[in-house]
Amino acid sequence: MIVLADGLVMGGAAALVAAVAGVSGGLLLVPVLSDSMGPLEVPWWPVAGVMALGLVSGVAAAMAPAVLAGRQDPAAVLAGRSGAARGGPGRPVLGLVLVVAGVVATLLASRTQEVWIFAAAVLGLLGLVALVPLLVALTGRLAVRLPLAPRLGVRDAVRHRMRTASAVAAVMAATAGAVAAGIGVNSQYVEARESFRSLTPIGTLSIGAREVGDAEWARIRQAAQERLPGVQPVEGFVPVNSRGRMIPLFPDVTLECTSCGPTTYHLSEVLVGDQRLLSLIQGGNDPRAAAALAEGKAVVFNPSMVRHGRLSSAPASKDPPLTPESSRCRPSWRRRPTLR
């Protein structure tokens, strides 16, 4: 009960200190990292969940030492003899099997979803945890070559290998979790950086609104010109259905993926406008593109979006495609000005 109480107190204290430090550090770092974030908001329920997890982790980490302490002979403990709690060398065969299975599963899962990679890594980590008592016992053979203080420490760790194994396993699990989180965050950052494509040139201001009429657009245009004198607006359009709701169109592209098979995904929203909008997007005048646009053709900047000389587009929702025969989604056009 004393060992479990220690785990409860230390786990609760660690969770409280970590929550205060994390929230305070986040609030202090947000103005430094970016001046466009805000308003600041602390998600208290997730923070409370993490604190509860830390509290439970502290109690769970104390379970094994508490059981070992409960099995000791009080007379032997009072006499300074606690050899009954040393424990065995563990299960090396099971640990080796789990480590090999985890490595193989990780290699096989590297081409699948992240959840399977995580599951395979956990399998290998459990194998390492099973091998920790054996590895701690093997370190005792190196004690004779160490100076006095490290030799005494290693021998004490080997005598109480179960206590040492618990600490080593906890540190190893925490390190593996931190490394996995770092790899995941960095991978997402690199993917976002490499796949970023700006829809409009840098420095372009886009003004849009939903379900507004011509009168509202006139007031929006007038307000924009008052705030930005001398700026010439370039109008863009989006289709609306018979109910007046906007239905943004997206290129419907099917590409062949060698590892995942045919996949369909939506790219950036299709912009509808005249030659001024085309010049804005291109950053200059292209006579061939302007001539094609004047003939009623679509101008694309990625050849993979064209199939048999046609560009296929669809709304973002699961509504039927926009066709003249569709009574519910017959498109009209509504202005959405883009200011340069």
Image (cartoon, helix red, strand yellow):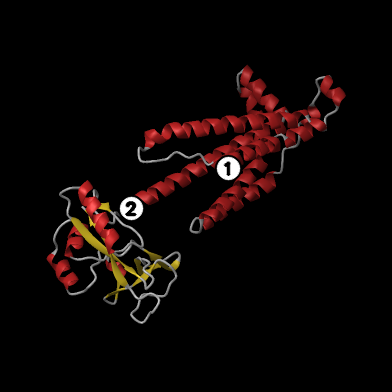
Residue 47 vertical placement versus 9 (above, below) = below
State which quadrant residue 335 falls in. bottom left
Question: Residue at position x 40%, y 47% from top?
Answer: 189
What residue is shown at x 43% (from left), y 67% (from top)? Answer: 317
Q: Nearer the viewer, mark 2 or mark 1?
A: 1
Q: Counting other residues with Cα less than 10 Å from the Cα at mark 2, is it few (<14), some (14-19), or many (20 or more)?
A: few
Q: Does 254 appear above or below 202? A: below
Label 2: element kind: loop
Q: Secondary structure at mark 1?
A: helix
- Residue at the bottom extreme? 325
Would you identify the image quadrant in which residue 287 lies? bottom left
Horizontal and vertical percent for residue 82?
79, 26
Residue 44 location, quadrant: top right
In the displayed structure, does residue 197 sit left or right of residue 153? left
Residue 66 in percent (x, y) is at 76, 33
Question: Which residue, given by chain and number where applicable, does mark 1 sit on?
Answer: 45
89 or 63, nearer to the observer: 63
Residue position for label 2:
196
Most extreme residue toward the right is 75
Location of residue 216 in the rendering, given as x and y in whole percent from the top left corner:
29, 59
Residue that protrudes farthest toward the top in the picture? 148
The residue that appears at 60% across and 45% down in the rendered structure is 125
Q: Residue 183 or 234: which is nearer the viewer?
A: 234
Position of residue 168 in the picture relative to residue 279 (left or right): right
Question: Is residue 254 visible to the viewer in this orientation of the structure?
Answer: no
Q: Amino acid at mark 2?
A: Phe
